[in-house]
Amino acid sequence: MNKLLYKFQSGKNNKYSYYLKHFLCYLIPQTFYLHKLDRTLQKVSQRTDYNYIKERVNYYNKLNSINYLPKTALPLHEHRYKKVAPKEGSVYFFDSYEYTRWFSQSFKWSYRFGDITYIPEIPSIVKSRPIAGNNANSVIMKLNKIRHFIFVNDTIPFEDKQNKIIFRGKSNKKEKRIRFMEKYFQHPLCDLGDIGRYNDGLPTAWKTPKMTIKEHLKYKFIMALEGNDVASNLKWIMSSNSIAVMPEPEFETWFMEGTLIPDYHYIRIKADYSDLEERINYYIEHPEKAQEIINHAHEYVEQFKDKKREKLISLLTLQKYFTQTGQLTKPK
């Protein structure tokens, strides 16, 4: 499949409509959102799902005491497209600005954009963080969502899919993926391929063209292997009628990977992948158990589809950040 055709059939989010929408919104004066903030949040406590919203906010933002930012922290009024986007990336800028524009531009913040696998020294807005340890300084926002938040409408029942596990991804400098490819490439139960550059030092035999999401969905099992941080395909796998297969995750994003239950939301395999064949064969022989996992995965995904609620959670997460950094009076 050539590159142009792949862009239209990949099944991924449309970047052109994303940029058009956000550029147009960027032209709206910031004061418009600042005046709307109180009105938008004042009735949250009256919602029937308020406790759920509060739990989500406290999961993303675990700051429980005042943590003042250093004087070098950047004020929000410096968070502007021409200054930030060329260096940090347009999607990270737009996804963060979508919510920072609601707050006083004199507030200061710290952010770490990109695939973050460490915990910052000061409270910082991140896309990803380690699940283990004291990760309170890593305050998660829904960043790079155009790549990470894709859901599908899968019309192929599990029983009609191929009894194989598929993996397509870039493995260069990603140790977990390299070890998996070394162990199972050309295994009869697997359809594996690396879609990276041919000159990246990995075996040429691994190299294969990209596959669309639709092509992935012909298989019962799809590997969700962490790369630089999380496995970006996990969200759309869990919204499909296929099953995500992976070791327990080490990193998490807005998808709250740390709350996923092994063998309930996905098929867990050992970190060294040694039980892959045994685990896959079990679910091939017990399709009713496989369907239970698919049903649970669908239930989990549904919580992220309420756009109005997702906006409220994002605003409240950021509001708590400014409160716990001593810049905003604690809301009543």
Image (cartoon, rainbow, N blue to C red):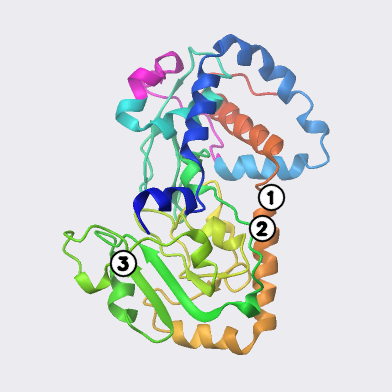
Label 3 sits on a secondary structure element that is loop
User: Picture coordinates of residue 31 (x, y %)?
Assistant: 59, 9
Label 3 CA crowd tier, 10 Å (few <14, some 14–19, many 20+)? some
Front-most of 197 and 300? Answer: 197
User: Picture coordinates of residue 311 (x, y %)?
Assistant: 64, 33
Q: Quadrant of residue 179 in the image?
A: bottom left
The magenta stretch is 61-84
Residue drawn at x 36%, y 77% as measured from the top left = 272
User: Picture coordinates of residue 132 (x, y %)?
Assistant: 45, 56
Front-most of 174 and 130? Answer: 174
Q: Quadrant of the N terminus?
A: bottom left
Label 2 sits on a secondary structure element that is helix
The residue carrying mark 2 is 300
The residue carrying mark 1 is 303
Q: Main secondary structure of the magenta part?
A: loop
Task: Kindly identify the amino acid type of the residue bearing the numbered disc 3.
Answer: Thr
In the image, 128: left or right of 310?
Answer: left
